[in-house]
Image: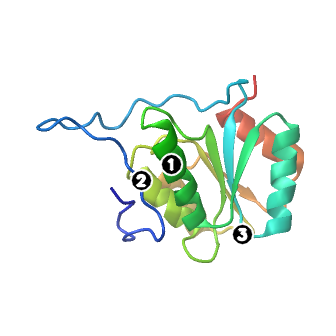
Amino acid sequence: MRFEGRLGRAKRSQARWGRAEPGKRPAWPPKPVAARTPGGRPRVLVVEDDAPFREYVVGVLSNAGYEVCEAGDGGDLLEKIADVATKDGIDLEPFSAILTDVRMPGISGADAIELLRSGPWRHTPTIMMTAFSDSQIRARAARLGVAAVLDKPFDADRLCQVLGEVAPVS
């Protein structure tokens, strides 16, 4: 199955969301399980096209106790989800939370989240980051069920506070 939605087919990304026995439909949506590492740390996907800023966010979250995966744009986000889904199976939420920039080349963070919301990861908590906050971005985020919109620049304490509300470190 491909990631498809109102926006069309996502480039470079495919995922198998499970197969059912002939004549039966797979359980939909799969029961989500909080994604944690074997050591109990929450797993977070950070999606940001500005490499220095992404490194800053990854450093802050790693120091705060999160296991962090990185993606450079919305297409890369969908690939990471597909890779984890193929490896871990559909009964696991691949990430405890997704933290994504809104505006990126290719598939934007908002477009990628819209595609994810049409699949089994519709309940994965998402936080959007933007340097161009306006009422349209906030309205779209609300329609997509985004937990929060962080205005850039933000400090490490604010980032950890907002992420801790949706994916707390034990």
Q: Amino acid at mark 3?
A: Asp
Which residue sits furthest bottom? 105
Disc nearer the start of the sequence (2/3) = 2
- In the displayed structure, 55 sits above or below 120; it is below
CA neighbours of label 3 inside 10 A, class few (<14), some (14 to 19), many (20+): many
Disc nearer the start of the sequence (2/1) = 2
Comparing labels 2 and 1, the label whose residue is closer to the camera? 2
- Residue 15: mark in rendering: 2
Residue shown at 84%/58% (left/top)? Answer: 55
Disc nearer the start of the sequence (1/3) = 3
Location of residue 53 (image quadrant): bottom right
Residue bearing mark 1: 145
Residue bearing mark 3: 49
Q: For numbered disc 2, what is the local secondary structure? A: loop
**Is 119 positioned to the left or the right of 135 in the image?**
left
Q: CA distance from mark 2 to mark 1?
A: 22 Å
Marks 2 and 1 in Cβ contact (< 8 Å): no
Q: Position of residue 106 (x, y in %)?
A: 57, 76
Q: For numbered disc 1, what is the local secondary structure? A: loop
Q: Amino acid at mark 1?
A: Gly
Q: Amino acid at mark 2?
A: Ala
CA neighbours of label 2 inside 10 A, class few (<14), some (14 to 19), many (20+): some
- In the displayed structure, 15 sits above or below 134; it is above
- In the displayed structure, 113 sits above or below 72; it is above
Q: For numbered disc 3, what is the local secondary structure? A: loop
Viewer-proximal residue among 68 and 158: 68
**Is 161 positioned to the left or the right of 110 in the image?**
right
